Amino acid sequence: MKWLPKFQWTSVGHRLFFLCFVGISVSIAIMGFYFYNKSTRIIQEKVGSITQQAIRQSGERLDLIMEEYSTRSFYLLGSKKLQQSIKDDFTDNYERDETNKEIGDFIANLLNSKNDLVNLYIFGEYANSYKYSTGYSPIPAPTAAIRSQAWYRDIIRGDGRVVWFGMRKSLVPKPWADDRWQGPVFCFGRAIKDMNNLNRIIGVMLIEIDPATILSQINLGDSGSTMIVDGNNRIVGNRDSRMLLQTIPFRLSGQDSRIETKKIGRERMMVMHAGLSNGWKLVGLVPAEELVQESRMVGRFTLYLAAGFMTVAVGYALFAAWQLNKPVQQLLRGMQEAKKGNFEIQISAHRKDEFGILSRGFNGMIARIKALIDELYVQRLLQQELQLKMFASQMNAHFLYNTLDSIRWISKIYKVDEIGTMIFSLSNYFRASLSEGREFVKVSEIMTLIDNYFEIQKIRFGDRIETSVSADRELAECEVLKFAFQPIVENAIFHGLEKKRGKGSVAIAWNRVGDNLQFVVTDDGVGITPGKLNEIREALKDGEKNREGSNFALKNINSLIKLIYGSGFGLEIESVLGAGTKVTVLLPMNRK
């Protein structure tokens, strides 16, 4: 944009743009990151919970299926005909054939009721052995090689309980094995006990089931895989026959409801498992990437949304910087004009916000500076005039000193002591009053000035007036304004005591109050009426000097003190009609 100059960090507008842009960008980034992480966790927990629930339900269905297998095999164990056939307890061949036929029908109707039986092997320990596949037929007796195999011994040790072997190739070797089924089968077996002597095992039953029924219950769809793991962490159930009887490459926790993340090969997997009633575990594996497919969509949406907000943020930051930079530039141009000496400059101040207040304040300040410059110019002219008058008055004062001194010596020659005393006091008074042109004098010099003034007034009033002057010793060297005290003493005599009948007194006191100096003039004269006292107090509150009226002296002294020392100092007056007046002046204690 044309109005946007080259970036400078010292520019308020540029800094505002940068801060707004960074602040909004960081906020959007943090919000987007938090939103993405939170949504990802929620999706993972939700999908993981659903998958875990599916694993748990599949485990419950597997328990029911294996319980059904166990029940079907139990019915076969209790068959009297099977016991008779294994022990070869027949009277003739006819009875043998009829019994075997009944056993075949029984197996077909009960054990193979769902048409999922692949092979049934019954190995008799003492007599006959049989096999059921397409029918019930005898097989050769078990040899020592078969009896020494691990599965055979495990069934014997099972002592009639179901011994589960899971999915695998058929355990039965040739010539007993049936070659019609080439794939893996789901195997389990039981020892056959003599119903007349339960401590005697008369045979071994091995049942091979079509694993399709089992595999149908452990399907998590295309997103994951499921396997059955035995107590030795070997895979005894899986769609991939190559993985059967392999040990799983990870450890399972003891908590069935826990969802764990495992790194299997190069892929991160979510691992969930549920315990089965026979001690096995149904384990579900879901790639972690599959669980976050939806969160990726959320991430892309968040990214697009953040990009849109960033675009809006840039526009907002530019607009905000422009809104701030425009009035600042106006103020800057106004200040530059004022710096050049143009105090007629006025900037636009129509805004109602803080910039409008600043602009109006700037205009007022410039106008005030111009007025002060004009006033200072006039004051300098007046000061030069005053210096000329003071120089003339000093010349007249020296002439007055010499004249008064001559009159004093003449009064001594003619022995008029009152005139000599008055002339002497008046001469000292003028000398102390002028103080070589100094505006600030010591308290001791003010006390001398007041003493000389009292000496002159005593000649006029005689013994009608009693005076006293007291001061703390530490205040004698403090410097005060020279012209601020004598008019107060004069007011006490002429407005308080002159109108009083009889004698009167004036007390002057210099006191220290904290870090300040207090000058107190107290008289017992006629006092001031309440109305007049209020008028004087109101006049003292007014900040401007008053050149007319009876309050001229006190008001100007008070204004002069506040002008020189500050608003915390000044003059206070108290009075009771007929009882007297008290005037207090508070000044800072200055020893220089």
Image: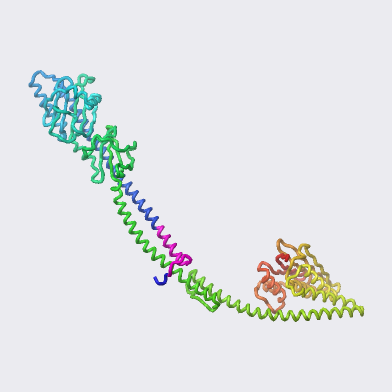
Query: Residue 564, how many percent across, how many down?
Result: 68, 70
Q: How many marks?
A: 0
Q: Visible in this render: residue 519? A: yes
Q: Is residue 114 left or right of residue 18?
A: left
Query: Residue 367, how many percent across, how many down?
Result: 56, 76
The colour scheme applied to this rendered structure is rainbow
Decide whether the magenta segment is chiefly helix, strand or loop.
Answer: helix
Q: Is residue 171 magenta?
A: no
Q: Quadrant of residue 313?
A: bottom left
Q: Name the one closer to the observer, 49 or 573.
A: 49
Query: Residue 389, how many percent across, how many down?
Result: 73, 81
Q: Name the one closer to the observer, 441 or 122.
A: 441
Q: Is residue 463 left or right of residue 301?
A: right
Q: Is residue 251 left or right of residue 167?
A: right
Magenta-colored span: 5-27
Residue furthest to the left in view is 94
Q: Visible in this render: residue 63? A: no
Q: Is residue 149 above or below residue 504?
A: above
Q: Is residue 367 above or below residue 296?
A: below
Q: Is residue 479 left or right of residue 25?
A: right
Q: Is residue 13 magenta?
A: yes
Q: Quadrant of residue 268?
A: top left
Q: Is residue 461 above or below residue 195?
A: below
Q: Quadrant of the N terminus?
A: bottom left
Q: Quadrant of the C terminus?
A: bottom right
Q: Is residue 214 above or below residue 82?
A: below
Query: Residue 90, how many percent across, how many down?
Result: 11, 19
